[in-house]
Every structure is written in C-alpha cells, then in structure tokens.
Amino acid sequence: MLHLGAIMTPLSTTHLGFLAVIAFYLCSFHGAGAAAVIALLVTGVTAELLPRMLRRIFVPELLLIFGIAACWLWLVPHDNTEAIHAAAGMAISYWLLIPSRLGMLRWVLSLVIVELLLQSRTPNVALSSLICIPIGLAALGIDSWLCGAISARASARLKAQSRSSLIRWALVPTAVVVMASISAGTWVVQEAISHHAASQPNNPRNTGRPMVVNGLQQSMSIGEHENVDRDPKVAARLSWETGADPTGTVYLRAMALSELVLEDSTLSWKPARVGELQPAPPATHQPTRWARVLRMPSYDDVVLRPDGGDAVDLDGLVVDYDGNRYRPQMGEALRSYRADFDDGQLEADPATMLRYRDVDSRLDVLPWNEIEDGRWRLVSPERAAVLIRDRLWERCSYDLTKLPTKLEGPGGVIRNFLFGREASDRRGHCQYFATSAVLLLRRAGHTARCVVGFASDEIDDRSVVFRGLHAHAWIEVVNAQGRWQRFDPTPATYIRDREIGVNFGPERQASGQGEPQPLELPPVAVPVEVAVEQFARQWWPVLLPLAVVLVFLVVVVLRRSRHGQKLDPRLAELQRRNDDLVRLAVSLGVNVTPATTISEVADALQRRTGVVLDRHLDAHLAARYGNGPLPEPWPIDALRQGARTKPQPVRT
C-alpha cells in the first residue's frame, strides 16, 4: 500500500500547490493550451506521489519527457503560438518543481520575469499577466520559510514531531499565502487596468458611446441616425484557402439581433445580455473550405466570420442564445484567424422559435392591411420572404440621406417608411428594409431575425475587402428544413449607392495588392473577471477530484499521526520535555531560532544559570539517537532558581 503520509512532506505539498497555481494562470490567460497544461499537471502530481525509490531513478523526468511528447503530438496545435507558450511554461514549471527539492521553488520568480518579458513584446501589454508577480514573490518567500522550517525539523529539538505537522507547516500556510497572492494580484491587475483606461482620454470606452466594430453597433435603433456611415477605411479582409473564387456579394457576419424592442415610438434591435454568455459549442460540421479573416483593431469583441459558417479557429470563445460569438478583448488588437467558408446554413434550435416570432402588440394599431397579403401565411417561410421582399421593393426605395421623419405613435420612423402617403416618405437604407421584413414575416407566423455585418463585392486577387461603408443589415428565416436561410430585402444597388462620391484615396489601390500575409499575432490577455469565470467553468472537473484527494490525504496523515503516537509514546514524552526546556530558554532571554539545536539551548542555559546540564544532555542524546532509556526530566525549577540567584554581568 502506498503510504501518502510518508510521501507528502511539507516540501512536496508546497511544490504541488504552486504547480497548480501556475497551471491556473496558464489556463486562464493562455487558454489555447489548457488541455496540455492540465495533462502535464496530472502527470506532475502522479510523479510526486511516486515512492522515493522510483523518484531516485529519474522516473519523474521520464514521465515529463513522455508527457511533453504526447502533448506535442495530440494536444498542442502547432500553428498556435499561445498554446505552445502555455505548454512550454507548464513543462518548465514541472521540470523545476517535480520532484520536489529544497531551494527550487525560488526559480518560479525567474519564470515570472520571463513571462513579463514575453508579454512586454505584445502591442498591447497583457495587464492581466501582472497577477503572476505576487505568485513569484510568494514562491520566493515560502521557499525561504521552508528552508528554515526544514532545517528546524532536522534539528534535535523538532526531530520527533508528529506527522500532523504537515498541516501546520505546509497545507494551511500555503493555502493562506496562495489565496493572499491571488487576491493581491487581482487587485493589482484591476488597478492597472483602471489606470490604463483613465490615462487614455481618447479611448472610446471612456466616452459612454455604444461599442462599435468599424461601423457596426451592438444595438440598432431605427431612425436615430441621419445617414449611413460611408467610411472607406478597411474594417476586415477575407482570403480563402481552397475552392473556387467567390462571385457577387460576400457577406461577413457579425451578430444576429433577435429582440425587437419598442421604446416610446422607437424600434430598436437589442443583442443578448452579457450575463447570458456561455462557452461556445463546437461547430456542427467539419468545414471543407476555410477562409482567413484579417480583422482590424476595433472596440468590440464580436467575432467576424463568413455568413453561414459556425467554425472559428479561436480559443476562449463565448456565445449567446442567438449564436453570436465573442472573444474577450479581441477588439483591441489586429487579429488574423481561420473561419468556416462553406457558406452553409446554420441549424435552428426548435426550443427558441417563439423568441423569433415576437411582435409588440402595440404595433397592431398600424394599418397593416395596406401592405399585408394573406398568402404569406400559407406558403413556406422562404417563399414568404421572397414575396415580402418584392412587396417592399414595390412600395419603398433605397436612400442614404433623404430618410423619413419620425411620426408620433408606435413605430415612429418605420410607420412613415411603410405607410407614408408620399413616395418621398417611403425611403430608407438597409436597417429600414431588414426591420420591416422581419416584422412582416413574424406577423405572418414565420420565424425571422435581423443580422448585421458587412456585405461587399470588392474582390481582388483571392481576397474580399470589407470597409466601413460595407456595414449592412439583412435577415434570416427558418426554412422548411429547420435551418436559418439568408435573405437580403434591401435593393441590390445599395453598394453602388454608398460608394458614390466617396474618396477612397490610396486604400483602394492597397486593396488590390493580393492576399494579405498570415500574421503571427501575440496572445491577447483575458480580463480578470473573464479569467475567473473561465477558471470556475473549465476547472471544476479537475478541482473536485483534487479536493477529494486533499481531504483523503489529511485524513490519512492525521490517522497515521495518532497511530504513530500510540506506537512510540517515549519519543512523544521526550519531545514534550524538550519543548519545556526551549520555552524556559526563551523566557530567560536566550536567542532561539528554528536552526538552534537542543545542545546549544542546554549550553546557553548552563552559562546563564550555573546549573550543570551535561548529564541530562548526554541522557537525552542517548535516548534520541540511540537505545538509551527515557531520561529524567530537565531540572526546570533548578534552572529558574539559578537564573534568579546567579549574578549577571554588568553591561558597560
């Protein structure tokens, strides 16, 4: 049977604790390599629990080599620098801390310095990496403390301590220090982020304006904008790896907006609430065509991808109930990633259908009979979408500047756009057409929603250029096969109309230089709040068995401690007598440190009191290191009396 009490010393327990803390940091802030990090952590714990005989013949080192090879072959994507970074950091930590050796824990501070140097090379320094600073300082302090503690245990005074000292000397102090370090690190990171944000007055995050993605908004209020943004600045580029070149208009999806809210007389599209974000599920299929999305820096975390594709080669993704995908702090840096380019149709969840049929009852007062057709309820959803698109094209026209005025009552601008008496009133851009089409489809009993993103036909040598003026809104309908099918109710001339009079400057020429080169991008830091949420979400399967093992370990150690005391009460009594002598020495002003031996204590007391302790010391050493009988107690009363009667030297 494996005796855990004999293996889990204070040193090994502390090393395993810090190995787990390092794994937590790497999984939280370099999540692409989480699988490799957890695998190496489990390997390290296993290696540390091996019997000492196996540890002496380099079995932990062999396990490390095999673990690195397995991670490289199966768990680490070779084209993902973030995953390689995490796996390498965990492998180095394993090599330093396993098997546990005195004095190696302080090298964790060197790992902290290397991590900060690597993070300093990023365009936007990962402030969340500051949390590793208190981890490194705690490792240095605990290592120094362990050196003194273990030296004290090796001395005669503490040699016979029971195994319950594991809890007092390692588990409890280590847990307290680790929690304090993480709390201090979290505070440091939050303060640094606050200072960083406050020092950038031009940062749009400080203006209170809606977060945007180069022309897109996370909410869309119909009628609040006088005209459409026609910024020619490039927002993204899409290049495809295989297959035929696309033709016509290419749609780059940002997010679906399903909730149509009526506030006073204004209709607004709202996204999912942040609290409803969940880990993104895997793609529903393996793409046969891949595209590379080059996404310019912006101020939002939404993930752009070709419309109809659900696979994205990014780690740490979260998703809302509409299927919108986000990557924390993605918007603050240039990003290049692969995405599904199969141009398929996303599966619809039957459990959420009612959400996409909701129409505010206050809109029932509008004269819908002027535009609705009873046939729309009888045909398939995709046929109804075509009929409604044709009806909108008959009644309304596309315009960017001459937009309808806001009318009183429910609907506001949409009321004038759909039912205005003059043709000049029934003008609008893509937001008007998309919102009207969704309203008509939902009133006809079909499932529909609005989608925002980019639509561009600016195609050069194997790449599509998406500019701010290409920001667009279209709709999706659940077709007869139960999939979301795209329909664009806006007249097809909208791209040409937006480009009229726009000065593209050198950017138009730059867009024809061919496919952008793939970028090797630095890892993007994850905010502390998101990191903690990811930790709680991803690590509970690991923490639960570790907690069970820890409780089992404590129980085994306590039981062995009580059992050991019953088997050898002589050593326990000897230790109690030694503790009495040490307490007396401290009360008399003798300098006692963790490294002070019982012989040194006896010599100091003999000089201090004049009481000869040679016979008692010899008997004690014989009982401690030999087979001598239990000696008589130290003459505590005589030592106290001697301390009171012996004159002390006068200090000058």
Image: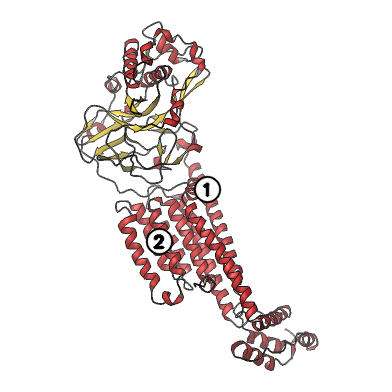
The residue sitting at 44% across, 15% down in the picture is 413
Observer-nearest residue: 136 or 361? 361
Residue at 35 percent across and 41 percent down: it is 283
Label 1, residues with CA under 10 Å away: few <14, some 14-19, many ≥20: some
* Residue 353 against residue 240 in the figure, above or below: above
Q: In the rendered structure, which amino acid carries the disc numbered 2?
A: Leu
Q: Which mark is residue 252?
A: none
Between the residue at mark 2 and the residue at mark 1, the CA separation in whole angstroms equals 30 Å
Q: Nearer the viewer, mark 2 or mark 1?
A: 2
Residue 593 seen by the camera: no
Q: What is the x, y in percent for residue 551?
A: 57, 62
Instruction: Pinpoint residue 419: horizontal percent, then vertical percent.
Output: 41, 9
Asked if 589 appears above or below 473 in the picture, the reply is below
The residue where tag 1 is placed is 190
Q: Quadrant of the C terminus?
A: bottom right
**Res 555 → quadrant:** bottom right
Quarter-wise, where is residue 368 in the image?
top left
Q: Secondary structure at mark 1?
A: helix
Which comes before the other along the chain, label 2 or label 1?
Answer: 2
Structural crowding at the residue carrying mark 2, measured as other residues with C-alpha within 10 Å and reported as few (<14), some (14–19) or many (≥20) = many
Image position, residue 222 (x, y; %): 44, 20
- 333 relative to 106, above or below: above
Judged from this view, the residue extending furthest toward the front is 1
Dot 2: what SS? helix
In the rendered view, how is the structure colored? Answer: secondary structure
Left or right, 248 with respect to 193, comes to left
In this view, the residue in front, 386 or 154, is 386
The reply to whether dot 2 and dot 1 touch (C-beta < 8 Å) is no
Residue 97 visible somewhere in the drawing: yes
Q: Position of residue 473 (x, y in %)?
A: 36, 25
According to the picture, the residue beneath numbered tag 2 turns out to be 40
